[in-house]
Each structure stands twice: as C-alpha cells, then as structure tokens.
Image (cartoon, rainbow, N blue to C red):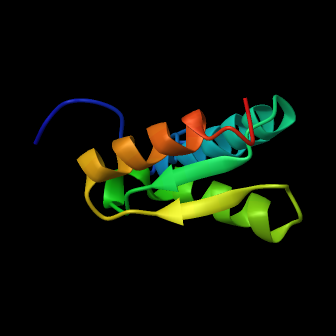
C-alpha cells in the first residue's frame, strides 16, 4: 500500500469538489471579462468545466455553448468564432 494520507483522515481534500469549485470560479471570471462562446469537446477530464459552463448558461449568462466531438476540429471552430466580424 502506498504511503500517504488516509482519505478518511480529517481534512482530506475531495478533488472532485475542488475541481468543480475551481471550474465555477474560472467560468464566473471569464464571463465577467466578456466570454460569450465556449467550444466544448466532451470528455471525462474536462467534465467539471463543461458542467460549470452549462450551469452558467442555464442561470442566464450571455453564453453560447458549442459541442464539437473532435478536439482538433473544435480548435478550428473556435478560431472561426473568434474571427467572425460580428464580435471582436
């Protein structure tokens, strides 16, 4: 058994909750700074961020979510949104 803290030990960090809290903070900051579009590639590693973006959109943030399965295609899709003449 690897050495380290026992998860049942008092003060243990729940990484799922921590990831979720940090994702919510990030989304709140980005929407405050003017984020209006988010291009998502679904996957387990970015689930907290996707959930935070979804919740912000549902709660009334001026945020449009775009889901693109392939990450490389998502990058080009996001670049196209950024270069659209309707928004700087």
The residue sitting at 69% across, 60% down in the picture is: 64
Left or right: residue 11 compared with residue 76 = right
Counting from the top left corner in percent of width and height, residue 21 is at 67, 45
Left or right: residue 70 compared with residue 9 = left
The quadrant in which the C terminus is found is top right
Left or right: residue 59 compared with residue 55 = right
Residue 87 image-quadrant placement: top right
Q: Looking at the image, which residue sits at the far bottom?
A: 58
Q: Is residue 9 visible?
A: no
* Residue nearest the observer in this picture, 24 or 70: 70
Counting from the top left corner in percent of width and height, residue 50 is at 54, 58
- Residue 56 versus residue 28 in the image, above or below: below
- Residue 63 versus residue 22 in the image, above or below: below
Counting from the top left corner in percent of width and height, residue 80 is at 48, 43
Q: Is residue 27 visible?
A: yes
Q: Looking at the image, which residue sits at the far left?
A: 1
* Residue nearest the observer in this picture, 69 or 76: 76
The residue sitting at 29% across, 51% down in the picture is: 73
* Residue nearest the observer in this picture, 47 or 33: 33
* Residue nearest the observer in this picture, 50 or 22: 50
Count of numbered badges drawn on the protein = 0
The residue sitting at 46% across, 58% down in the picture is: 47
Counting from the top left corner in percent of width and height, residue 37 is at 65, 49
The quadrant in which the N terminus is found is top left
């Amino acid at each position: 058994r690897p050495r380290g803290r026992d998860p049942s030990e008092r003060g243990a960090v729940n990484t799922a909750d921590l990831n979720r809290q940090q994702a919510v903070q990030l989304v709140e900051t980005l929407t405050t700074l003017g984020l209006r579009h988010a291009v998502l590639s679904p996957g387990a590693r970015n689930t907290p961020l996707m959930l935070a973006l979804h919740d912000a959109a549902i709660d009334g943030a001026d945020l449009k979510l775009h889901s693109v399965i392939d990450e490389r295609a998502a990058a080009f899709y996001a670049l196209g949104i950024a270069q659209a003449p309707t928004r700087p």
